[in-house]
Image: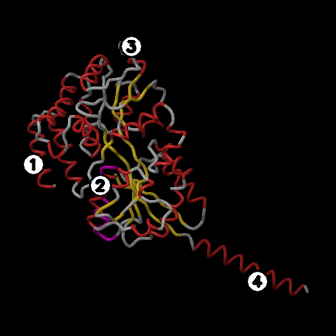
Amino acid sequence: MKKTRRCVGFFLSIAISFLLVSGAYGLETVEMWSYVPEGNYLYTAIDIFNKSQNQVKVVAKNIPFGELKRQVAIAVAAGEPPDFMMIDNPDHASFTVMGAYTDITDRIANWEYSGEDFFPGPWQSTVWENRGYGIPIETNTLALFYNVDMFKEAGLDPNRPPTTWEELTSYAAKLTKPGVYGLSVSAIGTEEGTFQWLPFLWQNGVDIEDLDNPRAVEALELWVNWMKKGYVSKEIVSMDQWSGVRVQFVNEGAAMMVNGPWCLPAMGEVNFKVALLPGRVEKASAMGGVNFAFFKGKNIDAVWEFIEWVYQPDNLEELAYKWGCLPVLKKVAETSPHWSDTVGKVFIEQMKYARPRGPHPKWPQISEAIYTALQEALLGVKTSTQALKDAAKKIEKLI
């Protein structure tokens, strides 16, 4: 009897050891590249996922925004891309056409969600020639933040933010004083500069195909005049939206700023409100956002375990809120208590006027032509007319 018990115990210990070892060896590691800044809740969410199961481990590599596309292109050319990445949505088409991404149309067809469950703009940024090459993970748009206390000090009504270009300029003039600029925007020589200026182009009734139109020149001259009159800092040509524009506003170095919902978790003690971007001929803002994209020949089955977890409504809502962005699933956005306050409602309303950039496989080059013209005019290298005329010639060849 004792011998039988010893045998049973022996084989049981072997079985347990086998399960433990096979479990350890069964852990699949997948790599994700992202430009999302360290400290963002995204990395906390990844850690939560990794600890929630023992089948898949996601390892995230952070690459600066301005470097990501170049490093991805190098990795793809070398045949050594990561398993998946997070890509700024206007850049999605360029890598799709390059042949870098896996077609996931059939996988989506068997998923619990379809394109109709997502906001249309973000979803369309993942589609090329009616095939799906990714999934939106967050979306956002630009609105006008303003300092309530500074409005009051300048004799402006905080409940009546500017609604036109003329009012925006007038308010900026009244709010400008020693040590404080009336307004802050980003005119940096990256996609962020294009993203910030495009709404003003669209608000004046023209688009990127019309850069040599007088209305386009008028939109650029608006910014040039702000700088000449000292309503915005000369440093806007090197200021990004997060560590530049946001920080200037939070430190009360600017009374208003054009920025997105990603700033909301990091606004410090500033007493602020948010309003729709002032319009001109029409209302407009730019649609931003990030997509997941999956590289050919990599472990998409393991990555999909993470995708299934992320898009559970509670997880997606928490991620979007703590990221400071809007959920891409319509039902989640519409029912989330996080976006039911006054500020949240402004961004939901602004999304109605938000336009995508592209999608176009040459968007990076198109954007470069635009932000180069923006910088040339602001730095006085060229007139607004000449800068946009040169940009128009470049874009005409691209599209």
75 part of magenta stretch: yes
Q: Secondary structure at mark 3?
A: helix
Quadrant showing the C terminus: bottom left
Q: Quick check: 382 above or below 62?
A: above
Crowding near the residue tagged with mark 2, few <14, some 14–19, many ≥20 C-alpha atoms within 10 Å:
many
Q: Secondary structure at mark 4?
A: helix
The alpha-carbon separation of the residues under discs 2 and 3 comes to 43 Å
The alpha-carbon separation of the residues under discs 2 and 4 comes to 56 Å
The alpha-carbon separation of the residues under discs 1 and 3 comes to 46 Å
Q: Quick check: 61 above or below 283?
A: below
Q: Nearer the viewer, residue 339 or 365?
A: 339
**What type is the residue that disc 1 sits on?**
Lys
Mark 1 or mark 3, earlier in chain = 3
Q: Nearer the viewer, mark 3 or mark 4?
A: 3
The residue identified by callout 3 is 153
Magenta residues span 64-79
Crowding near the residue tagged with mark 1, few <14, some 14–19, many ≥20 C-alpha atoms within 10 Å:
some
Mark 1 or mark 4, earlier in chain = 4
The residue identified by callout 1 is 393
The label number, if any, that marks residue 11 in the structure image: 4
Predominant SS of the magenta segment: helix
Q: Is residue 241 left or right of residue 303?
A: left
x, y percent for residue 92: 31, 57
Q: Nearer the viewer, mark 1 or mark 4?
A: 1
Mark 2 or mark 3, earlier in chain = 2
The residue identified by callout 2 is 91
Crowding near the residue tagged with mark 3, few <14, some 14–19, many ≥20 C-alpha atoms within 10 Å:
few
x, y percent for residue 46: 52, 55
Q: Secondary structure at mark 2?
A: helix
Q: Is residue 82 left or right of residue 202?
A: right
At horizontal 46% and vertical 41% (from top left) the residue drawn is 324
